[in-house]
Amino acid sequence: MGIIVLLPVLFLSIILHEFAHGYVAYRMGDDTAYYSGRLTLNPIAHVDIVGTLVVPAVCWLFGWPLFGWAKPVPINPRRFPSPRKDMGKVAFAGPAINLILATICAGILKIVILSQGHLGAQLAATLVYILKYGLLINVFLAIFNLIPIPPLDGGRVVTALLPLEAAMKYDLFVGRYGMWIVFALVLTGVVKYLLFPPAIFIVSVLAKIFGL
């Protein structure tokens, strides 16, 4: 049952993440995603062979938590009124929607727990299983993407917040090797030390808010 019920949750989470980037860019004057057919919730438009298919499959085969990503939405910062700062807003939109989804999952989870007597034990257990995963995967997606290393969203947010000269140096020295740094963090397992503390904090805050 695991992958059958969890995979749609993962797909929805990463698709909404990319949709949020495109939507915020569109609202600020860049219609690149719209005319590329990416301002849509159709999952086919966002499928990335590696991130959406191969990585979740490998996670399932090895018994790891399901994880993945969608094809990045095309964005043209030169169409923004303030390209550097607006790009930071677009970048933050993805993690922000994941945090919103995590909050929604926590709220629905509370309702399911309170209503489990009316739902039946099996249905309630399945919904709790799905919603807990939805909460956790969206928290982890948000935090992972906010790691301040280009090309992750956090790197673009940092670039937007830094003074221009510092941002240029940051992109030059960190951005050049950003993807390799991210791979190194994942392959060495160091990434868990970056993800777990803030994830535990956010989940505990949501649990306290909703009385979970």
Image (cartoon, rainbow, N blue to C red):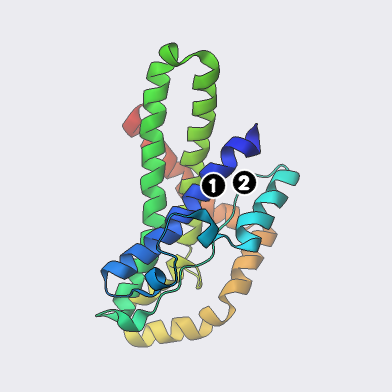
Residue type highlighted by circle 2 = Leu
Indicate which label's residue lies in the foreground, 1 or 2: 1
Asked if the residue under mark 2 is in contact with the one under mark 1, i.e. CB atoms within 8 Å, the reply is yes
Q: Residue at x 33, y 79 (%)?
A: 84
Residue type highlighted by circle 1 = Leu
The image quarter containing residue 37 is: bottom left
Q: Mark 2: which secondary structure?
A: loop
Which comes sooner in the sequence, label 1 or label 2?
Answer: 1
Q: Where is residue 203 in the image (x, y as percent from the top left)?
A: 43, 39
Give the Cα distance between marks 1 and 2.
Answer: 7 Å
Label 2 neighbour load within 10 Å: few <14, some 14-19, many 20+: some
Residue 51's disc is none
Of 187 and 70, nearer the camera is 70
Reading the image, the residue beneath label 1 is 10
Q: Where is residue 196 in the image (x, y as percent from the top left)?
A: 53, 48
For the question of whether residue 197 can be seen, the reply is: no
Q: Position of residue 180 (x, y in %)?
A: 63, 73
> Is 167 located above or below residue 66 in the figure?
below
Reading the image, the residue beneath label 2 is 66
> Is 143 located above or below residue 28 in the figure?
above
Of 207 and 9, nearer the camera is 9
Q: Residue at x 45, y 81 (%)?
A: 170
Quadrant showing the C terminus:
top left
Label 1 neighbour load within 10 Å: few <14, some 14-19, many 20+: many
The image quarter containing residue 155 is: bottom left
Position of 121 with respect to 40 (left or right) is right
Q: Which residue is the extreme one toward the right?
A: 61
Q: Which residue is the extreme one toward the top?
A: 117
> Is 169 located above or below residue 120 in the figure?
below
Position of 57 with respect to 91 (left or right) is right
Q: Position of residue 3 (x, y in %)?
A: 64, 39
